[in-house]
Image (tube, helix red, strand yellow):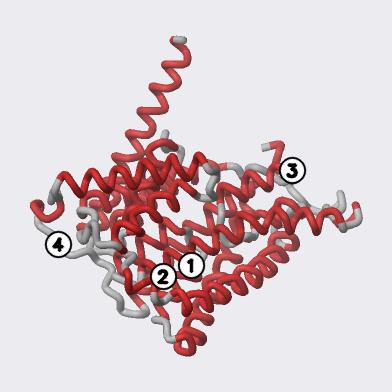
């Protein structure tokens, strides 16, 4: 029992150190007036420390709690006017589906040929979304449970880092938060609003878990909060300090994942994932600039809806950009549900029809033994 408590205490200290470092990174980026400071600053500083061997760790419970908060934040941007756009959004959803298929095919080829991965590992690493479900499904299919999450973490890190920089430097978008006073940051809404937000978060989180809704930890609170805002039960957004806390926790959580990159055998995966992500970003940019005018959608909103950076992370960027957050959240929800449901089913269909010799690279190939560490 004492040993268990010691391990648990050590984990808590590592989590606390990570959050302190993440907060310092956010403050530094805020002081330097850099884009999306609280998430990017915490993510970059913690990731550098993790790679250098700092004793950083993340709290899964805290991250889940903040994901529920992000569900509330995304849901708060829905309105009755947004419902009238669902017809147009269905065309955008079709476009997102085509983008997912095309990027998966290109990435699969890259991970097989350049990353020298076996088919299950390459297939589930190439999906433009769904880090958790793809890691689990990939392991069950016989893939490498170390390389798959690393490939996805690199993708998320690259997207979350590069998209704000592109928007700020190339498109001239102001992503630097306004210099709010302390009283504005720490504003406390009426207790009735807190009560409703709390009900949406708890009922949405645990209700979605009870019915096993895919990505229910964020979708459950988001759907309930959207209903509350559509019927104008609440008309104000969550206070700024809640958003800042969510960004620090999410950014820190991403950064701690880079502690796994110290092994030399993952270098090929990192390089291949970077190349694959660059192709995904270029594809999203081209499609957004070309198709958005035809659909009558803001190109920046369509770009944020396409890039495979994750619902939580892209939602934060959409909030900072004051883009069409409801549209972006809906498109990312569609993307991750599409991937989570169809990817394992499609892989099983393909796997059963492949000859044994086509499933893996020959033994003579220069393929690292990822399981040996």
Q: How far is disc 3 from disc 2 in space, using C-alphas?
A: 43 Å
- Read off the residue under disc 4: 179
Q: What element carries label 1?
A: helix
Mark 4 lies on a secondary structure that is: loop
Residue tagged 3: 369
How far apart in space, not on screen, are marks 4 and 1 (Cα)? 31 Å
Contact (Cβ within 8 Å) of mark 1 with mark 2: yes
Task: Measure the C-alpha gap from mark 4 to mark 2.
Answer: 27 Å
**Mark 4 vs 2: CB contact within 8 A:** no
The residue identified by callout 1 is: 331
Question: What element does badge 2 sit on?
Answer: helix
Dot 3: element:
loop
Of callouts 3 and 1, the N-terminal one: 1
Q: Residue at x 26, y 73 (%)?
A: 174
Q: Earlier in the sequence, mark 3 or mark 2?
A: 2
The CA span between labels 1 and 2 is 6 Å
Earlier-in-chain disc, 3 versus 4: 4
Residue 63 in the image: state x and y as whole percent: 40, 42
The answer to which of 54 and 214 lies nearer the viewer is 214
Q: Is residue 52 left or right of residue 103?
A: left
Comes first in the chain, label 4 or label 2 = 4
- Whole-angstrom CA distance, mark 3 to mark 4, is 51 Å
Q: Where is residue 33 in the image (x, y as percent from the top left)?
A: 23, 64
Residue 257, above or below 239: above
* The disc label shown at residue 327, or none: 2
Between disc 4 and disc 1, whose residue precedes?
4
Mark in the foreground, 3 or 4: 4
């Amino acid at each position: 029992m004492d040993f268990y408590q010691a391990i648990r205490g050590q984990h808590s200290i590592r989590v606390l150190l990570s959050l302190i470092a993440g907060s310092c990174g956010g403050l530094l980026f805020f002081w330097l007036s850099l884009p999306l400071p609280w998430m990017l600053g915490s993510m970059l500083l913690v990731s550098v420390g993790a790679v250098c061997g700092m004793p950083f760790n993340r709290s899964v419970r805290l991250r889940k709690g903040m994901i529920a908060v992000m569900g509330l934040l995304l849901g708060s941007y829905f309105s009755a006017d947004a419902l009238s756009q669902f017809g147009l959004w269905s065309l955008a959803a079709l476009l997102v589906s085509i983008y997912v298929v095309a990027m998966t095919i290109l990435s699969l080829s890259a991970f097989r040929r350049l990353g020298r991965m076996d088919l299950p590992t390459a297939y589930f690493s190439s999906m433009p979304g769904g880090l958790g479900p793809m890691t689990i499904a990939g392991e069950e299919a016989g893939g490498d449970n170390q390389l798959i999450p690393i490939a996805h973490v690199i993708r998320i890190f690259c997207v979350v880092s590069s998209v704000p920089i592109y928007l700020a430097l190339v498109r001239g978008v102001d992503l630097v938060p306004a210099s709010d006073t302390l009283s504005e940051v720490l504003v406390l809404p009426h207790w009735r609003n807190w009560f409703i937000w709390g009900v949406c978060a708890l009922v949405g989180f645990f209700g979605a878990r009870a019915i096993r809704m895919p990505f229910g930890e964020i979708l459950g609170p988001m759907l309930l909060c959207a209903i509350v805002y559509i019927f104008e039960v609440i008309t104000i957004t969550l206070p700024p300090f809640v958003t800042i806390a969510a960004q620090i926790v999410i950014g820190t959580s991403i950064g701690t994942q880079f502690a796994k990159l110290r092994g030399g055998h993952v270098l090929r995966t990192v390089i291949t994932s970077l190349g694959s992500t660059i192709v995904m970003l270029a594809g999203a940019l081209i499609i957004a600039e070309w198709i958005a005018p035809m659909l009558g959608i803001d190109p920046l909103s369509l770009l944020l809806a396409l890039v495979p950076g994750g619902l939580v992370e892209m939602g934060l960027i959409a909030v900072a950009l004051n883009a069409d957050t409801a549209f972006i959240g809906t498109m990312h929800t569609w993307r991750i549900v599409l991937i989570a449901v169809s990817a394992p089913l499609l892989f099983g269909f393909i796997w059963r029809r492949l000859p044994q010799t086509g499933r893996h690279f020959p033994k003579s190939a220069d393929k690292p033994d990822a399981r040996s560490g």
